Amino acid sequence: MNKNLRITNSKFIDQTSRISFKFDGKTLYGFKGDTLASALLANNIHLVGRSFKYHRPRGIMTCGSEEPNGIVQVGKDPSMTEPNTRATEIELYEGLEATSQNCWPSVNFDIGAINNFFSPFIPAAFYYKTFMWPASFWEKYEYFIRKSAGLGKSPTKPDKDIYDHKYLHCDVLIIGGGISGIIAAKTAAQNNLNTVLLDDKNNLGGTTLFQNNECFKINNSYSSEWLKKEIESLNSFNNLTIKTRTTLAAYHSYNYLLARENLTDHLSLIEKKDKIRQRLWKIRAKKVIIAAGAMERPLIFNNNDRPGVILSSSIKKYIDYYGVKCGQKISLFTNNDAAYETAISLSKSGVTINSVIDIRDKSNSSIVKEAEKLGIKIHWRHTVVNTNGYKRISSIELMKLSDDGTAVVGNKSKEECDCLGISGGWTPRVHLFTQSGGKLKFRDTDNTFLPDKSESEQISIGSCNGDFELDDVVKNSNKSIKEFLNLNSSDYENLKINCSKETDKKNIWLLPSNKPLGKTKPFLDFQNDSTAKDVKLALREGFKSIEHVKRYTTTGMGTDQGKLSNMHALGIIAETAGVKIGELGTTTFRPPYTPLTFGAIVGRNVDEFFDITRRTPMHDWHTKHNAEFENVGQWKRAWYYPIENENMHEAVQRESKAARDSAGILDASTLGKIDIQGSDASEFLNRVYTNAWSKLEIGKCRYGLMLNEDGMVYDDGVTTRLSENHYIMTTTTGGAANVLSKLEDYLQTEWPELDVYLTSVTDHYATVSICGPNSKKILSKVIPDLDLSDKEFPHMSFKNALIDNVRCRVMRISFTGEHSYEINIQSSYGKSVWEKCFEAGKEFNITPYGTETMHLLRAEKGFIIAGQDTDGTMTPVDLQMDWIISKKKYDFIGKRSLYRSDTIREDRKQLVGLLTDDPNEVLEEGAQIVSETNKQPIEMLGHVTSSYFSPNLNKSIALAVLKNGKKLKGQKMFVPMKTKTINVTITDTVFLDKENKRLNA
Amino acid sequence: MLNYNSPIMNAKDYSGIKISEVEPIIKINLRGKNRDFITKIGKELSIIPPTDSNTSSGNEKLNILWLSPDEWLVYSNDKIDLKNNNSLEDRLFDQISKVKLGSVANVTDHWVMINLKGDNVFELLSSGCPFNFNDFKNSKGAVTQTLLNHVDVIIHNKNINDLNLFVRRSFSNHLWSWMNDSARFI
Amino acid sequence: MFLINCPYCGERDQSEFSAGGEAHIIRPKQPTELSDDQWAEFLFMRKNIKGVQLERWNHAHGCRKWFNMVRDTSNDKIHAVYKMGEKPPIK
């Protein structure tokens, strides 16, 4: 550490607690309370990175989130390293390792810096213009550009850190813990409002916290002393939550805000372990008070980007807060009074101040007089026309401004310095206000955009609302807060406030130089290396909209989103184009305010919590029996049960054969089940299904097809009439929630006159489906007292039964074409009933089968799966299911659409069966079907929707949708694949047991 | 013999929060629109179904939670042997559904009830629930249906820092793991 | 993320709701008597205006009730909510 640069009287830095860290491999030391930036400056390191385009040496410019240059890569671990972090925001911790970005081989010797010498040839949009021709060369250019472009390096392994989310509801949210935020917080808390105060720094107080200047007093104390007492008094409120290290990232409509809290980033590597790193707060506030403060503006002049050029207010914070001198010989360059506060602070700390260069003619404010009293030299109506030094500023050149400020006059003089503080006035942080949809207004006196109209319950107070002087800040904040919270009085009514008042203002967006503009480098956007020249070039080339200029020149498009550069870009554009800034408007400030980590965005929704999973009551049995699972919606369904080394095909072939030869058992618990009751239940079913329901007998089941109003198949399933006004409807697994919601919609909005009630009972029942020629024998063992004769219990009927005194519903229905039963029992007993059936079936080689076998078996029978063989464009007629459309019913959902001109077209895509000429060739699902092989291009007539090798038929079978398919039965078609063309024949959709003999076998 | 299987394993204790599944208890879903329905339920259960939104009513045996203007969830306080124990369901079905007053559906195993107890229960819920618990917290008997980590839940404020949370059985394992994961960070 | 005042449950986060498109499109009582064009008018045609629009919303993860909303699509301001079957409170 350079002893000369650290003063010893800072109250905010714990100089007894030394912290070691590494920067670019070198071990350095700082103190607890330092940021990486303040520690580097204390070590006399200004140069931290290279600029994006020209690879110019760049140093720390600010002390906050607006930092454009001091961005570093933190950490070496390939799963934890983080690029593009701002050195000004990283709190120093033991073990911190940071490296410079965008330089190779090192920040001190960077090959890319050669771009700087070519810079006259790299104007705005150089890359766009140069690499566009010839278009085919792009791939070659890209390789080189990608290598040299970009800032930090992203991590290459999964993030090991833990992040989470939390919701927070409050009456008042205050963003920013500076003086106005603290006044707001205390006032709100005193009035019993549930209040939350956020600040992105590690402690509250903003810049007033270290404002120890005779010119700024409240009730005769230093403003800092007064504020400290106010902050202490906040501890007494338990209805006030204070969150430091918490950055407001986004302000959405209805006062929904996202804030990122850093929980461990400031802790040592050991302390961080196993703790949540960052938490994203999802805040809903009744009222929001924005007290986000203001940013100091830079000044735009030739070579204003050298390491050692720092915002004047930041120099003040480094000396007054961190106790760090940014240099030993400092010059200040300003257009307003703020730089004089810095000058006084530096002077008191024993730093040599060369002079203050002020573009104004004079100033009569008390702070300027105070500076003069201290003997600080002031160059009135002067400007800096150039800076010298490569890796660190070494001198500045100044000249007198002409009367109108557009040119420089007289002789150039030179001033040696190792740091230049610049101050171009203040920009209120209106980003959050505009994110919420608020509109801005422009104030000409100091060229600021200020909050104007807003739709949400919010106010802006303090300097983000354009109050830059202490008395205005306190008085106006107090007034606004009272009005906003409907209060008659507050603690802040009769404060005695002394402060320096600015008497003179002057602003020049682009400061004149003795050289022509083309020969200078007045940087606007320090991170993206765009200069005032680039903006002017864009205007000359015809760009008018600020949004276009931004994208063409990349001004304001870096990781800092142009927090420093935007106002000057606007100013120069307005001036050049001869329009008013207020009319030009600003670019859109989009969330997040500062970059968010992906970790914070996803929170705990990673790994097992990435998506919701649903399990059936028999899940553990499947797992124990080696099942592979398939995701069906959110469900985990048993897919197949491989034995020993079977692959999926082998397992499915075995399962499919067993189910038809003897017995199979399937977990069908995932099917949606809706309990329907009410005196109009039958009429309701008539209206929602295509077929007729009124005459369904009690105890009978019926298959139904549900359409959308557009006539397309939506869902299907079997519904059973349990009693006079009581039905149980089943839906597809994936369609359950949507079907229930759609049916509720009709009941609530279109047919409120119907006396029908729906209740989802999907999870109440476990469903065990046993099928195959021996299923009857197995069921008779499980439920001995149930009469299973075809007469008593025919296909498509249901019985109530008891298993061990537990009620269950047994349906004789079949999705495989086999004789089969579904036992529905309440879920707590599902696994036990399953095991009971499995035991009873052992002598019949009962085989558990999964969804893949189920799909194969139903395809053999030509049964559709809604969502696989249909895609929202298939009518029942297209599916060759005309039999299910009632001709007698006056209306049902989708009926009218079945004879629209488009739905009655005969050449629509229709469901057909396909057989491959080679019975061993299995088609790929999704493969296209064509009628010729020699023509190109050729019309695609349809595609394969389901395809399997059937072990029961010993050949390949497939279902497909095909244009005009119904009429093409028996014809040959082709399925072209990457390496061959497969010959197929169009067939009927039913491949097995066309007579349905097996149902009653 | 059929064995009873609960979807969730053991109760867990964390700092200021205890999470446990409560089973088996009876749960019945009621739907109905007219005054007769309310009166009949009141007569059968000796509890009037609440008509104010987000509230509940109950006695030492049963609770009735408001779910919507025409829907309620009844659940028992005491654990009950589910085998051959359908008298409440049957009685209500006969008195309501059969006489066309509304609907009665057994949802005992549709929902899994998880009890959350301790000073930090609302801390846990705030990790995944967009609902504003500020008033709910202090109003005994309050009911809400909302999302917890993207899963539908019904929450019944049984007592101060003593909540019963209902989640569909198929989601219960997932939510249980999520709650246990979140609870360790409180 | 809106804060929606469900007419039954009160103010809730938008994530509990699902949107159901334009409101007051009544399903014809006698669809079979309509021409293709008339049916298409009901089936497909929606206004999708910039400005104050009447919409259907469902409190899907709450009471599951459908209701109507008066919302300005240009600034997402919800002017009112009202129950199914009720007339829009403002125009």
Image: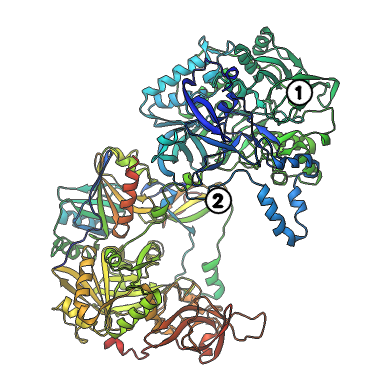
Task: Residue A317: name its quadrant.
Answer: top right
Residue A850 on image: x %, y %: 34, 73
- Image quadrant for the N terminus of chain A? top right
Give the CA separation, mark 1 to mark 2: 55 Å
When the figure is inspected, residue A461 is found, relative to residue A872, above or below; the finding is: above
> Residue beneath label 1, please?
A396
The residue under label 2 is which amino acid type?
Thr
Q: Nearer the viewer, residue A643 or A521?
A: A643
Relative to A496, is B17 on the left or the right? left
Crowd tier of the residue under label 1, counting other residues whose Cα lies within 10 Å: few below 14, some 14–19, many 20 or above: many
Please, which colouring scheme is shown?
rainbow
Please tell me whether mark 2 sits on a helix, a strand or a loop.
loop
Residue A957 on image: x %, y %: 45, 84
Relative to A107, is A645 on the left or the right? left
Crowd tier of the residue under label 2, counting other residues whose Cα lies within 10 Å: few below 14, some 14–19, many 20 or above: some
Q: Nearer the viewer, mark 1 or mark 2?
A: 1
Q: Nearer the viewer, residue A26 or B69?
A: A26
Q: Nearer the viewer, residue A751 or B165?
A: B165
The residue under label 1 is which amino acid type?
Ile
Specify whether residue A381 is in view: yes
Please tell me whether mark 1 sits on a helix, a strand or a loop.
strand
Task: Residue A142: name its quadrant.
Answer: bottom right
Q: Are marks 1 and 2 on the same chain?
A: no
Chain under disc 1: A
- Furthest-right residue in view? A410
Residue A305 on image: x %, y %: 71, 31
Chain under disc 2: C
Label placed on residue A8: none
Label placed on residue C73: 2
Q: How many marks?
A: 2
When the figure is inspected, residue A333 is found, relative to residue A896, above or below; the finding is: above
Specify whether residue A752 is in view: no
